Structure formats: C-alpha cells, structure tokens
Image: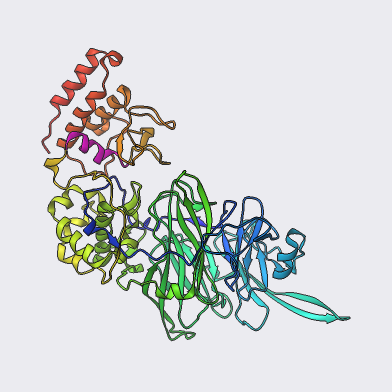
Amino acid sequence: MNRRFLFVAVICLNIFSTAKANDEKYCSINVPEKPDKTIRLPYPLSFFISPNPNGEEVAVITEFQNRLVNLSKMPDGGEIEEDRTDTELPGNVDPVFTPDGKYITLPSSYFYRYQEAKRKGDSARPVVAGNYGAPYQSVGQPNPNKEEYNYISDPNPIDPASDNTNIFFTQVSIKEQKVFGIFKRKKKTVKTGHLCKDKITGSLPMISPDGKYISYLDQGTQTTKIMRIGKDGKDCTEMVDLGIPTGKVSFNFDEKNRQLAFHVERSNYMSGWFETIDESFSTDSFIMDIDTEKTGTEDEKWSISGIKRLSHTSMPGTGTYYPRFTRNGGIIAAKTTIDDDGDRHSNIVQYGAGQVINIQASRDSIIREADVQGDKVCEGAPALLNQIALGRLFSSVCDSLKIPDQEKDSILISPFIDEKSCQNLVRDFWNKAWINNNKNLSPVDENGSPYFDQIKQEDLLAICPKQTGTQISKKKKPDIKIKEKKRTDEELFRDKCASCHEAGFSEVKGGLAFFHQNADGTLVENPENTQGHIGLNSYSAEMSILSLISKPEDVRNVMPPEETIISKTERKRIAQYLMKYIDESEVGNDLKNELQAMIDAYSTQE
C-alpha cells in the first residue's frame, strides 16, 4: 500500500485562478513516448504492484485476491483474461517479489516459493512465516548468490512498545537441504529489530534491491530522502533529499548507474494510502538520475543529475503510478485510464530498458532540499522560485491538467517545456500586467508579499530548458484576459470564483457550486443545486454579496479567501453582477433595494 502526497505541499500556496489566454506556440512540452505495452486488466487495481524482476510478470492486488499477470505473451493493447493470462497468488494484499525472483513475500514477513505460489495460489504454504512487521514490506538482497534477505516493513502498529516511528527490520536466511532424496528448505531468522532506529521519522520506507539504501518520506520536511544503511543497520547516513514528497520509491538494479523511479500525486492536498485513482486526484511518474561519488566509503555522496518524465497526465481521475524497475532497467507501472464512455479502467504499462534510456532527461531541474523548509519557500532560493514561476506560467496558459489546482505541478512541469515555447511564454506573458493579475499564483515571503514581483523576464529566460518538446492540448476557452480592462463582469466573476466553486470536484468551497462544465467542456454558470451543492440562486447570491462587501468581522465566511488577490473595485463589480440572481419574488423588494444600496455605498478606495 502507499500514501498519496501532493509534491508541492512544501510550498505555502493556495490556488484560486483558472486558465488564461493561449496560443499553440506556447504549449509544447517534452511529453514522453507511449509505453512499449499497455495491457488492460479485467478488474480494478488496488494499492500496489510488484513486477517479477525478469519483467515478464507482475503481481497485483485486486479487490479481494492477489493475482499474477503474465505480460510476456501479451501484445500492446491486449486485455488479460482471468485464469488464462493471469493466476491466483496467496493472500489479498501486497505481494512483493524478492530481488532474485525466487520468492513472493506478503506482509508480516511471509515468504512463498515463487513457483509454488504461482501453481497453488492460496493453497501454497509459506517457507517463512515470521509474523514480523506490518502493514507492507520491501525486500533487499545484499548477496545475490545467497538466499539471504533484508525484509523491512512500515512502523509496526501492533507492538505496544513501538512509537510508530521506526522501520521494522527482519533478516532472513533460507537454505535447501536434500533429505532422503527430497529437497527441504531450512529457514533461519538471523536478526530482527528496527532499521536506522531514531534516525528516520517517516513513512513509505522502501529498501533497495541490494539492501544497502532505504528511501522514506520525512514527515518533518515533507520530502522524500535516501539513506545509506550502516553495517549494523543503525548508523544510517542521508545520501540525498529529493526535495519533493513522492510515492514509494523504486531503486534500479544497476549499482553503477543509480536511478530512482516514483510517482507524484499532482493535484490533491489529502494524504494517506490510496486504493486506486479516483476523480479527486491525478498521478504522474518520473525517473531521477543519480550521480554517486566514493561509493561504499564514509564520504559517499549522491546528487540529482537529471530527471525524466515517464508519463504526462492531463485528465483528473487518471494517472500512471507505482513505477517499478525490472532487472534489465525497464519499468513496469500501474495506469488508470478513462474511455470515451467515461468508464475507468486499470492497466499495466511496460517500458523497455532501451526506451527508458532513450527518454530525454532534463538536466535543468533545480529541485534541492536547501530550497524548501516546512511549508515555505526558503529565503534566498531564487532558483526554485524561478522554476515555480515558469511552471505556473505554463499551467495558466496550456492544458497541463484540466482541474483548478493544476498549477501545483509547476515544479515538475518547468524542466520539460520546449525551449522555444518557454521563450515565447516568458516574452509575451511575463510582464507587469500578467503578474498583477496572477499574484494569487505566487508563493509569498514571510511578510505575505508575492515573490513574483521580484522575478524579471531574464530570470525565467535563463532557465528555459534546452530541449525540443511535443505539442500538447490547448485550452478550449480562455478564462482570464491578460488586461483587466478587457474583462466583463461575467468573466471577472468566473476568473475569481470558479476554481473554488465548480461542481464535480471533491472540495467545493462552502458547498457552493457556482459553475459547471457543459458537454463541450466550457465552464458556465450553474443556477441549479447539484451533487448536494448549492448553485446560484437568491440565497447564495445574497450571502456572497454580503461576504464580498461587508467588513470581515461582520460576516462568518469572508469571500473570496484572503489568499485570493482581489481589489475593492473587483469586489463591487462581482457583487453588482450577482444582483441578477436576486429574485424579488423570493426575497422581497425591501431586501433587494437594501442590497443594491449597500453595493452603491461600497467604497472602492483602497
């Protein structure tokens, strides 16, 4: 199982703006090529996948049963037939292969001989049933020639002595003996305890195939970190901070060419295990190239040398997630898609080793742990701020993700923008008018001042990636005009309010759904109650008008929230526009006249 984390939760920011004008010359991005194979499953995936290191099969969790999916004989676009091209496995959660592919493990340190598990399913008997650790696991193998495994699991919630901050560790040795001509396995639990005790306070731990490193999500910094495991399992040393919170990391098998694969939850502030992709969030997968120095010594160092975008998702409720390395350097991942009829499907995607190598890596990524701290951009981190600004600019113009908070993917968008698109974007959009109209997209300093005011065109041009991209979809309708004087009251209302009050999303602020998308995707005003949310009517319009023009202490819910940059003139315009929804037959003539008098008397002086 895994937990979903918004990777820019480390940036103190709320998004309240939607799309802006666009032109196709601005919207080219280095979108990865399609996988070698996409295989549709007949059942929804649940939580986690684990490929056989040989790349021919993948263990998955379905709703009630672990299954082993055979990929080797499936063509691209094929569909698994249950009990024909898949088989039952023991258990119903987290089947994980050992690095040599000889065993399948389950939580609580159950080891099943792979061939027996594949043949007998739930009837197979475990070789090891140590009952150590919970609720999910990963396995390393320090010596590839011996069946000795370092098994770790998430902090054990069952142990009353545990403070739930240390990673449970079990070292298992399995040997075969021939007794009266019959092979019998002798297991031995060599060591149990906690890994990197008191050095790691976090979650989502994953051990590398060679058992030498561990990744985890640091709860304090909300970033994923890699630690080197000391000889005794205690003296652990931090190798690198990825600078972002990720899903569970997969280490590749090639120790001389370190890579890390992971997914990033792009659009939702909620954290916790997710069973499957749903309409409230979206995921993309990435590979980080790692440079290492003085490997195996006390002075060993890791650094991020580049990042590859493995997928590019542009629809809520879809995504590629849990990318896992195979032994030859390929990648197998889960993917959720939605067909033309709106039905959601689970798939397995497979990238060959050659394809992974050929995916263009951005060397322009400037994610560093020194740039973020807690929920704020650190002072003196202009490189990260510029990267955020460039990503927000691209997301505001181009169709990077069709949900209101799409700008949250900005850190991992900017390294992949086409060079010419980047230059056009910056030269044509990054100006005083755009910055003034989009300050709500900017991270702020300790005094609440937007950082965007400090960034010049030349700062962004200097970080435009040196690469050629592929055109992605343009936005169908511009929601914000660059120049304020061109916006109608209707457009102003939509631009300032739609991102928080659109029907169809899990979080509709205040339960007020003022907008919805019609059949062609155009955002229109919503006069009806929908999905349990209140639409535009006399009651909601009255409440909104009062919230807009009253003193904050006089109303329960200030609208818009203080994070939204909105002038008094804009407040008055929106309030006046909402008067069209005040039905005199419902509220009475006196109340309608009183509201109008309040709007007329409202001062627009700052």
Q: Is 552 in front, or is 544?
A: 544
Residue 326 image-quadrant placement: bottom right
> Do we see residue 445 in this rendering?
no
Q: Quadrant of residue 172?
A: bottom right
Q: On the rendered structure, is 44 left or right of 300?
A: right
Q: Is residue 585 above or below residue 122?
A: above
Name which quarter of the figure residue 47 lies in. bottom right
Give me the residue at 15% from left, 62% from top.
Answer: 456
Q: Is residue 367 above or below residue 284?
A: below
- Measured as percent of width and height from the top left, residue 74 is found at 58, 64
**Is residue 529 found left or right of 467 in the rendered image?**
right
- Span of residues in magenta: 488-499
Name the one closer to the observer, 311 or 264: 311
Magenta segment main secondary structure: helix
Left or right of 475: which side holds 310?
right
Quarter of the rendering occupied by the N terminus? bottom right
The type of colouring in the image is rainbow
526 inside magenta stretch: no
Q: Residue furthest right?
A: 180
Residue 48 drawn at (x, y percent): 56, 59
Horizontal and vertical percent position of residue 70: 62, 64
How many marks overall? 0
For the C terminus, the image quarter is top left
Q: Is residue 497 magenta?
A: yes
Which of the two residues, 541 or 85, is positioned nearer the viewer here? Answer: 85
Q: Is residue 559 visible?
A: yes
Q: Position of residue 94 (x, y in %)?
A: 62, 60
